[in-house]
Image (cartoon, rainbow, N blue to C red):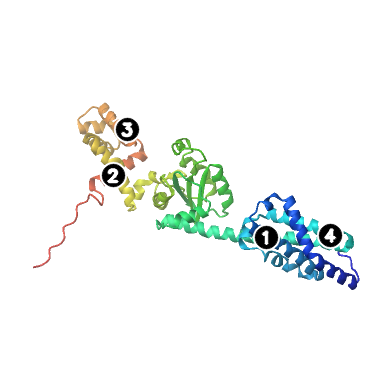
Amino acid sequence: MISEKAPTDKAQTLVWLRRISGDLATATITRLQETLPWYAEMPPARRSAVGLVAQAGITSFIQWYEDPTSTPWIAADIFAAAPRELLRSVSLTQTLQLIRVTVEVTEEKVAGRGEHLREAMLLYSREVAFAAADVYARAAEARGLWDARLEALVVDSILTGEADEELPSRIAALGWHGHGEVAVLVGTTPPQFDVDQLRRTARKLGVDVLIGVQGSRLVLVLGRALPAGRAADETEAAMPFAQIADRLEPGFGSGFLVLGPTVPALVDAGQSARAALAGFAVAGAWRHAPRPVEADDLLPERALAGDQVAKHTLVERIYRPLQGHSSDLVTTLWSYLDNGRSLEATARELFVHPNTVRYRLKRVSEVIGWDATGAREALILQTALILGAIGTDTTRRRMPSPRRPR
């Protein structure tokens, strides 16, 4: 508690404090230059602004000493003199150092004026420290809310494919450092979503992340960040996105988790996002779908749901390469799948030896990378053959236009 003194003593002390306030400010600036290296390295305009803050703090102390009930206005009194850019460039730690130096100088000057004034100074410095922390906390909260809104806007732009010329600057404002490949991961939002834990895990995995929460759906845009001095061709040794998705899986809610295909850069993330969303919509059609599952492993379900990208991918990756390599491969694959993946039945239909069927199936796997002997891959291949046979939108014949009556 502040010691009670006679009104005349307090009035005389206030007159004395007002008289030496200018000297206190000058001594504080001198001490700042001598003890704080960051202050000496500041541009002149910012040093002048810091001096105004110190002067405001001394003036505010005199006002508070006269009326201690004015505590709620401490922060407004002191930091109102600081320009907005100063609050952004001076950290909370530096602000507390500024307060400490100001208090030390003032304590030295008022040391001979009684214990009650020193106690008042200590109490006031505590209130100022709390007020400074409150100012920075509010600024950080406002910044966090703004970043969250901006991040949601960027993710929505990627998902909808409505990217504009402002997208790169918005992404840069979010601190995106990715300069390599990108993939989109789509899953469900957990009941207790810990976004900070998800970001920490992503940082440990060496990827940048943009997070979008759309109701029950959680979307992550993952970017492979290249460390300084590392060449782009060294990314082959980096962790695959499928493995990264597996490490991030605990951060999602129950349900399906779909990873879009890898694209070269963030500007192409819309392609990965569309595939991931399409896969997420039909993942329930694969009873034993792994978690996470790649969108390209859901090509048959996506194609049946009307996804034109999936149809085009199946035809271009499977049907056309086989057709261009050898018609025997297409014929053998058709027969093998139609006969329930039976080598003997296929050999009888084609009038060849079963070993010939085995050889051709091996060539199919070498050409397109899918093995027809597996149940799941057989479904993918059969879907591709059907789509290739009936034609895609680019190869299907146009329907003749009806004749107009003469």
Q: Are marks 1 and 3 in contact (CB under 8 Å)?
A: no
Residue 315, label in figure: 2
Q: Which residue is drawn at 90% across and 70% down?
A: 9
Q: Which amino acid does the dot numbered 3 rest on? A: Glu
- The answer to whether residue 217 is visible is no
Cα distance between the residues tagged 1 and 3: 73 Å
Q: Which amino acid does the dot numbered 2 rest on? A: Val
Query: Counting residues from the N terminus, which is met first, the one under dot 3 or under dot 4?
Result: 4
In this figure, which residue is indicated by the disc labeled 4? 109
Q: Which amino acid does the dot numbered 1 rest on? A: Ser
Using the image, determine if residue 361 lies above or below residue 106: above
Q: Which residue is drawn at 54% across and 57% down?
A: 147
Q: Is mark 1 on a helix, strand or loop?
A: helix
In this figure, which residue is indicated by the disc labeled 3? 366
Q: Is mark 4 on a helix, strand or loop?
A: helix
Query: Counting residues from the N terminus, which is met first, the one under dot 1 or under dot 4?
Result: 1
